[in-house]
Image (tube, grey):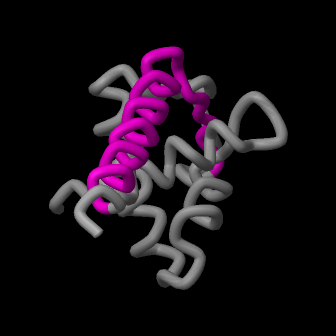
């Protein structure tokens, strides 16, 4: 399965903007991939959450969940920094585009 950087940013954004301190895998799937089929979407989100955890950008906070979709995740300090860096990069790209016009 290929990693999808746009999906990574969407997942981090969903965790940052969550009404509480964490979200379940299912909640993240609904925020990031609403139109995808349930099982395919959960597998895709779970894979990317594992990659984000490997990079230290998110942390799994529930060790045992009844289902994979119930596992809870939170964004880390490093995750906030990565999301802010992506937003800064987008702002710079917008400025470069405006300068070309």
- Nearer the observer, 86 or 25: 86
Which quadrant would residue 32 be assigned to in this image?
A: bottom right
- Across and down, in percent, residue 21 comes to 75, 28
Magenta highlight: main SS: helix
Compared with residue 29, is residue 87 higher up or lower down, i.e. above or below?
A: above
Which quadrant would residue 15 be assigned to in this image?
A: top right
- Nearer the observer, 35 or 37: 35
Q: Residue at x 42, y 46 (%)?
A: 91
Q: Residue at x 60, y 29 (%)?
A: 74
- Across and down, in percent, residue 82 comes to 40, 29
Q: Residue at x 52, y 26 (%)?
A: 80
- Across and down, in percent, residue 76 comes to 52, 20
Q: Quadrant of the C terminus?
A: bottom left
Q: Residue at x 60, y 24 (%)?
A: 61
Q: Which residues are magenta?
A: 70-97
Left or right, residue 50 beside residue 37:
left
Left or right, residue 22 beside residue 62:
right
Q: From this viewpoint, which residue is outermost toward the top?
A: 77
Callout count: 0
Compared with residue 4, is residue 49 higher up or lower down, i.e. above or below?
A: above
Task: State yes or no: residue 8 in magenta.
Answer: no
- Nearer the observer, 70 or 9: 9
Task: State yes or no: residue 80 in magenta.
Answer: yes
- Across and down, in percent, residue 54 comes to 28, 26
Q: Quadrant of the N terminus?
A: bottom left
Compared with residue 40, is residue 71 higher up or lower down, i.e. above or below?
A: above
Q: From this viewpoint, which residue is outermost toward the right?
A: 19
């Amino acid at each position: 399965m290929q990693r999808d950087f746009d999906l990574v940013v969407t997942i981090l954004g969903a965790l940052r903007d969550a009404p509480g301190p964490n979200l379940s895998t299912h909640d993240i799937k609904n925020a990031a991939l609403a139109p995808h089929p349930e099982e395919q979407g959960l597998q895709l989100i779970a894979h990317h959450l594992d990659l984000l955890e490997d990079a230290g950008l998110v942390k799994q906070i529930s060790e045992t969940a009844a289902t994979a979709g119930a596992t809870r995740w939170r964004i880390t300090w490093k995750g906030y920094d990565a999301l802010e860096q992506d937003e800064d990069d987008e702002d710079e790209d917008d400025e470069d585009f405006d300068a070309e016009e």
